[in-house]
Amino acid sequence: MKLRGFELVEKYFYPFAVIPCRKTKFSAGYDFAAAVTVTIEPHKIGLVPTGIKAYMQPDEYLGLHIRSGLALKSGLMLANSQGIIDSDYYNNVDNEGHVMIALVNMSDFAVTITAGERIAQGIFYKYLIADDDQTDTTRNGGFGSTGKK
């Protein structure tokens, strides 16, 4: 039985996709790398494909955090502060669960992320729900797929 982990996206072939791993024994995060080279223009948002999907337990999510060195050296930030990959994002009906990293370039110069460059860390988290939680719908799709309300 698989509990949590990573797989390559099957729909598209990304030759530089790398299964995330921890770099040291006590690292909390699994390093995510860019699967393609992407240039993010100054003060713009860019979406960086990783070629990876993540599976986990129903009461878990994968939190995405920018690598501190990348943020300090290039002026990049996650567009949404922390990315949240829900468990039902994996292999849902309309989306295979491809983890994409949305980065905003806060600098005055273009920043190029090269294929294979480590850009973010993913940490698995458990979460709690309220006593009166009644949600019974499931996800279909990717970014913004849970609607605007």
Image (tube, rainbow, N blue to C red):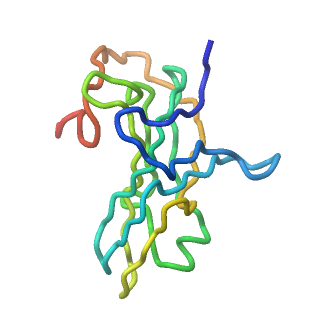
Q: Which quadrant of the figure contains the C terminus?
A: top left
Judged left or right of residue 85, residue 139 is left
Residue located 60% across and 67% down the image = 68
Q: Which quadrant of the figure contains the N terminus?
A: top right
Residue at far right of view: 25
Q: Nearer the viewer, residue 101 or 113?
A: 113
Judged left or right of residue 35, residue 73 is right
Residue located 58% across and 35% down the image = 125
Q: Position of residue 22 (x, y in %)?
A: 71, 47
Residue located 50% across and 33% down the image = 54
Q: Nearer the viewer, residue 52 or 74?
A: 52
Judged left or right of residue 9, residue 120 is right
Residue at far left of view: 148
Q: Note whether 147 is above or below 45 in the view shown.
A: above
Residue located 36% across and 68% down the image = 104
Q: Position of residue 3 (x, y in %)?
A: 61, 20
Q: Nearer the viewer, residue 29 or 116?
A: 116
Residue at far bottom of view: 108
Q: Note whether 46 is above or below 43 in the view shown.
A: above
Q: Position of residue 124 (x, y in %)?
A: 59, 37
